[in-house]
Image (spheres, rainbow, N blue to C red):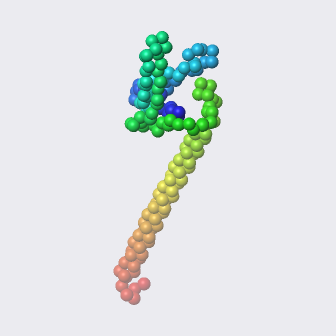
């Protein structure tokens, strides 16, 4: 039987709008006699249902049998069958954390953002200088035209033949 791990999970509000996932499992210790039993709680029966048959005809030794079925409203795709699955990692032995590559990627993102900001600043500075140069060239042209008009006007004021 393949049981989704979420069958034993519950989302718990920690505080401040933050939540965490609690997994309801028990460490199975070989030296502890309860470890030979599997106890299925109410969370298990959210995904499965059991058909229990009790036989009390023998008062000294009553028997109980169970047949498990996938629930009609199961949400986590449970499976009951005879598929052989590979042995997984023991969840009770902590595994070393994977190396963090996120820090490197964050550093690269920050560097690229800074380069973009510098390039935008240089582009703005270049546009500002170009606009100042255009304004200066326009003013110089207007000044030359004004001087040309003054020269033309002063020449036209002289009488003809008088030097």
From the viewer's perspective, tell me whether residue 88 is left or right of residue 123: right
User: Which one is in front, 51 or 41?
Assistant: 51
Q: Who's the residue at 42% across and 75% down the image?
A: 148
Task: Give the tally of numbered discs.
Answer: 0
Residue 137 in the image: state x and y as whole percent. Answer: 46, 67
Residue 107 vertical position relative to residue 69 in the rendered view, above or below: below
Residue 139 vertical position relative to residue 19 in the rendered view, above or below: below
Work out which residue is located at the far bottom of the displayed protein and give it. 161
Residue 158 appears anywhere in the view: yes
From the viewer's perspective, tell me whether residue 85 is left or right of residue 162: right
User: Which one is in front, 12 or 121?
Assistant: 12
Q: Who's the residue at 50% across and 21% down the image?
A: 39
Residue 121 in the image: state x and y as whole percent. Answer: 51, 52
Work out which residue is located at the far top of the displayed protein and give it. 60
Residue 149 in the image: state x and y as whole percent. Answer: 39, 75
Residue 103 appears anywhere in the view: no
Work out which residue is located at the far front of the displayed protein and give it. 57
Q: Quadrant of the C terminus?
A: bottom left
User: Which one is in front, 134 or 112?
Assistant: 112
Question: Residue 56 is drawn in which quadrant?
Answer: top left
User: Which one is in front, 105 or 8?
Assistant: 8
Q: Who's the residue at 39% across and 72% down the image?
A: 146
Q: Who's the residue at 64% across and 30% down the image?
A: 96
Question: Residue 139 is drawn in which quadrant?
Answer: bottom left
Residue 82 in the image: state x and y as whole percent. Answer: 56, 36
């Amino acid at each position: 039987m393949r049981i989704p791990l979420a069958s034993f999970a519950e989302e718990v509000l920690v505080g401040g709008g933050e939540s965490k996932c609690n997994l309801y499992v028990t460490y199975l210790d070989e030296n502890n006699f309860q470890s030979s039993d599997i106890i299925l709680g109410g969370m298990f029966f959210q995904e499965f249902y059991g058909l229990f048959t009790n036989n009390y005809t023998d008062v000294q030794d009553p028997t109980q049998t169970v047949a498990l079925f996938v629930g009609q409203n199961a949400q986590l795709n449970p499976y009951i069958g005879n598929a052989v699955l590979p042995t997984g990692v023991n969840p009770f032995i902590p595994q070393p954390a994977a190396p963090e590559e996120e820090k490197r990627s964050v550093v690269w993102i920050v560097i690229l953002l800074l380069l973009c900001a510098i390039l935008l600043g240089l582009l703005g500075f270049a546009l500002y200088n170009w606009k100042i140069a255009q304004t200066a060239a326009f003013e110089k042209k207007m000044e030359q035209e004004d001087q040309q008009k003054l020269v033309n006007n002063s020449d036209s004021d002289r009488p003809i033949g008088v030097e």
